[in-house]
Amino acid sequence: MADKKLGAYICKGCGIGDRLDAGQLAMIAKKEGKVGFAKQHDFLCNSDGVKMIQADIDAGEVNHLVVAACSRRAKSDAFNFENVAISRANLREGVIWVRPDTDDAEETTQEMAEDYIRMACAEVKYMNLPAPSEEQGLVRHVLVVGGGVTGLNAALEIAKAGYLATIVEKNGALGGAAAQFHKRIPNRAPFADPQDSGIADLIEQVESNNKITVHLNATVTKTSGAPGRFSADISQESGSTVTDNFGSIIQASGFKPYDATKLPEFSYGKSPDIVDQLGLEALAKQANGGAIKRPSDGKEVKSVVFVQCAGQRSDKEGHLSYCSGHCCLTSTKQAMYFKDANPDVDAMVLYTELRMPGAGGEDFYRSGQNKGVTFTKGIASEVVPNGGSLTVKFKDLILDEEVNYDADLVVLATGMVPNSGVNIEAVPAENEDKKDDAEAKAEVVATVPVESILNLDYRQGADLPQLVNGFTDSHFICFPYETRRTGIYAAGPVRRPMDMTQATEDATGAALKAIQALENAALGRAAHPRSGDLSFPSFRKEGCTQCKRCTVECPFGAINEDEQRYPLFNEARCRRCGTCMGACPVRVISFENYSVETVGQAIKAVEVPEEDEEKPRILVLACENDAYPALDMAGMNRMEYSAFVRIAPVRCLGSVNTIWVTDALNNGFDGIILMGCKKGDDYQCHFVKGSELAHTRMSKIDDTLKQLQLETERVQTYEIAITDIQRVPQIINDMAETIEKIGMSPLKF
Amino acid sequence: MSNLNTATVEKYRNNFLREVEANVEEGHWVKMCMQCGVCSGSCPLGPHWDHPPQKIFMMIRAGKRDEVLGSSSMWMCTSCYNCIARCPRELPITHIMHGLAHYAKRLGLAPKNQPTKKFAQIFWDSLSKKGRVNELKLGLSLYFMNGFAEGVKTSLKMQKVGMGMLKTKRMDPLEIVGGHGCKDKKGLQAILKKAREIEDAKAAKFQQA
Ligand code: SF4
Ligand code: SF4
Ligand code: SF4
């Protein structure tokens, strides 16, 4: 854009005009904010107000606008002007709605509004109009890794939407685990009987679809690029490799059954009559509706015990701590195999808690009971093979007694272990005993015998980052299929344990996201949560010290390294969180419309009164995803908070560069509050790691405070949920009280 | 009649459950219990029983035939219907309780000196004879249920109440000789006989199966 033409529009509607001196605000915008003009309007968001602004834009009077009215989250449709930069001063939710309408409060309320005008003017002055990098084009082709239920459904959905799909399956046949099932848990009313798995039909549909290519006995040996320009090497077992381009990727690599030999108490492997759930499926397939025979001697099974939670939901070493979610339903289904063939078979399900998820789960349970499956609440301690049969030792938890029960066959409901490839964040365990290196290495290899699924040539590692228990990280609450690698979507049991019904749903969701991702990439737009954002980070090479912090801290692995070891940004992999910008110690990373300057100058624009005026200033850096809306809602509920606070929204707490904090302190701010989302394993941070990184960075701010001879209480970091409407004003007021106690900052000029 | 008792029961096998299903009123519901314990928590008598309903149902599934049929629990049920009203699985628990009591009694497995059981027998004897309950005789036999000495003691204790009832014509002393009955006593006996035949046939059928 050639010249920046600044203009301010001050709304007097919604009571703003009654409570504030709009004329004074306009004057400040012109004199201090240096805008070309400042217009007042009685009702800015109505058609007349919007028309006025549009006319000014069309006439070339203005291209950088300050809209001083309501919160940036309100009336975003009305104030949605194209090809201009806009900054919003929040006079409604941020000022008049959080301040009492009294003569006493009038002066400080007006000062609040004036500062927000100054901040908005400063911000817009340093903003530029973003334009896409045009690094990638439109590639209407999705790579689907894994040919099980999830992969097949995903590929079909993609094809039905008119895009191409390529399935890479490492086995010799499609169908995955579901192909091993005799029948499936029903997904239709009346949810009473095991149901045909439908997998053959699914495979048939995929094979006959001319938009879908299938590679069997194949793996992905290299993936590079970014959404809109992924390139993948697909290698056949035979050694031949094809390379193709893809717009986006779905990883549906599924699960492997937990290794039941890790449960010596249940004697798996010691008797062929002790099987896991997939083992039972094989027996049922063999029987094909007839009586199920036990493997040891081919005798018809007359009594069978299902041991639930075998090595699951247990904190014992080597066990799975989680619930695999389908096993109670699966055991019920399998018990029905017996009961349907011969009602005289005793089929007992030993459980501690039954979990029957899904719409039909409870109906299916009832149906099992109706068919005479016995559900016994008890804990199995041992399975002992003895001659012709098996003794299951368990404690009946209702009758509170130890029981020995003889059965012909025992089925262990072991869990699902995700096929998520390499854990790129795993830190090799320190070898405390100081064994020699070779031995130590052998140990590491033995415990991580994992092959990569995607073989990403990302600097950050070959596979998708994991969250806990080896499942790929995905934003559980808001964006379930989204992983920490933009344009690569995880679906099915690689993401969390699930059954066929859920996997099918997952496949649909991931397919739609994958299509959206490749379309967005072609337009240079960000994926959620800043969907549509065209800005992307760029850096000033001359200033870069190659410290690598940005490449390491970027939660999405967006930054590679070029030959000279400088960061290499991949626009389409970037989610525009600004974490790199917050990380950069020499502050060379910026976005066109969001930078160290835009926020830094806004902070500097706040007028800090002299110490003896007794008017402290508190800066709040609030995450725009949760904390800022919570603050807005506090306003909507007319909850009051201190008039000494000045709030600056940030994209993510991760984007907060410590320079903002130090500058604010040096400028005489008395307290600083950082508000981000919940961090940790159950994070709510929209950018996964942003809040966590900010907390880590801020834990080191104490040194800075001490250097400046300031009290450490002056800077505080909080995890805020969008629902913390009562809590946010409290936090602000507490800070105001703290400052009253410890006194004003001595650093005022 | 009690040759059903020869049934051998293996623990946690389904045979006792099947026996209950076939012979106990509403017994086919037992398998539908999901062991939530709401009934036990709702039962006003719960804390005073050996085995509250939830436990009784689990015991049936665990094949504890002797313990279940010999339990005094079912006899303690007051038919308050709290459990039925609350059972999320809608089991007719009260009815099952009485069904179990009845079945146990029929097999001669019910606890020997259970007072409710004794009372029920006296009540039945009185009723089945003439089609009407003789309140005077019923009351007196109840007093003497546990022996002569205790009977005298109770009678003396209740003397005042008895006199009051006489005075207000709530009790007819002549009932002690004969007493009133329904019109067609023979017909009643025939009905009861037939009912017994049906029940026995049902039990025999289960035995054969
Ligand atoms: S840290 Fe955020 S803004 Fe920076 S490159 Fe990564 S995704 Fe993009
Ligand atoms: S009806 Fe009987 S078993 Fe049910 S709550 Fe009342 S007393 Fe207990
Ligand atoms: S309330 Fe019903 S389902 Fe629950 S334990 Fe009692 S009988 Fe069983």
Image: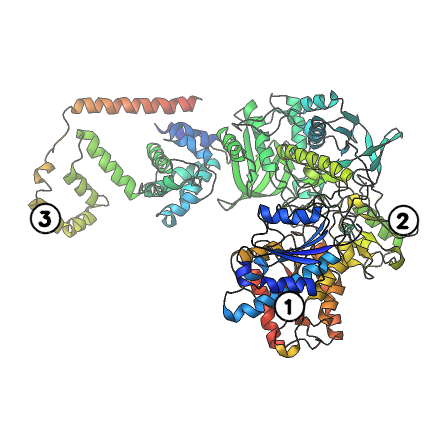
Of residues A266 and A227, the one drawn nearer to the viewer in this rendering: A227
Which residue appears at 79% of the width and 34% of the height?
A138
Mark 2 or mark 1, earlier in chain: 2
Of residues A629 and A251, the one drawn nearer to the viewer in this rendering: A629
Number of other residues with Cα within 10 Å of mark 1, as a class: few under 14, some 14 to 19, many 20 or more: many
The subunit carrying tag 1 is A
| Residue lying furthest bottom | A612
Number of other residues with Cα within 10 Å of mark 3, as a class: few under 14, some 14 to 19, many 20 or more: few
| Disc 2 Cβ-to-ligand 1 distance below 8 Å | no
Number of other residues with Cα within 10 Å of mark 2, as a class: few under 14, some 14 to 19, many 20 or more: few
In the image, residue A373 lies at what x, y percent?
A: 52, 32
> Which amino acid, mark 1?
Ile
Q: Which mark is residue A618?
A: 1
Residue for badge 3: B164
The subunit carrying tag 3 is B
Distance from the alpha carbon under mark 2 to that under mark 3: 109 Å
Disc 2 + disc 3, Cβ < 8 Å: no
In the image, residue B179 lies at what x, y percent?
A: 11, 34
